Image (tube, rainbow, N blue to C red):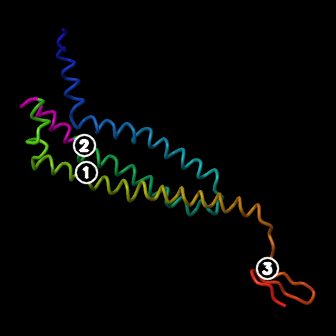
Amino acid sequence: MRLPSESQNTVTVWRSTQLTPNHGHSAMMGVFGMLALALMVFVLRQTSTDLRWVGIERFVKVGFWGTNVGLPLMLTMSLFPSGVLKFWDVVQHGYWHARSLDYTGSERSRLIEWLRLPGDLIFILFGALPLAIASINGWLGVRLYHTSLLTPKLNWPIRLTNATVSAPYFQD
């Protein structure tokens, strides 16, 4: 039976602290999520008319700043500090203590969990929600544009010889 080396133990400890969610959030949303949002904005711009884009662009600007402010706040106020403190607790008391209820239920741990809330709220309210509204507006704009191409364009009311036709009712 082979015992794990010191470097393998260090990697295990680093992966088992809050530094792992910190890395996961920053890597997945910070890189791939922002690329997906950039692609979404590119497609919205290409499929929207200039007049429709003016209304969509306001939501995109707010969403851009909401995601780019909310994610760093989430990382710096909660995930990174809790990861460093948990790693320090592992070094001082051992891995078992950092995973126990004594550590996770402490006041400091609870405070750091609640410090994540401002970043999450900014990310959701000023980032995700405006971008969702922008994408819905873009989808509705494309849908309305394509359905307007399929319907005949009639100027109402249509004047006939002795009758006037008004939409949606017919009158003599």
Whether label 2 touches label 3, CB < 8 Å: no
Whether label 1 touches label 3, CB < 8 Å: no
Residue drawn at (19%, 15%) of the image: 4
Residue drawn at (9%, 47%) of the image: 106
Crowd tier of the residue under label 2, counting other residues whose Cα lies within 10 Å: few below 14, some 14–19, many 20 or above:
many
- The residue identified by callout 3 is 156
Query: What kind of residue is marked 1?
Result: Arg
Q: Which residue is outermost to the right?
A: 161
Depth order, front residue of 1/102: 1
Crowd tier of the residue under label 3, counting other residues whose Cα lies within 10 Å: few below 14, some 14–19, many 20 or above:
few
- In the picture, the disc for residue 79 is 2
- The residue identified by callout 1 is 116
Specify whether 154 is left or right of 119.
right
Instruction: Please check the rendered image and state whether residue 110 is part of the magenta-colored stretch, yes or no.
Output: no
* Range of magenta residues: 81-94
Q: Position of residue 79 (x, y in %)?
A: 24, 43
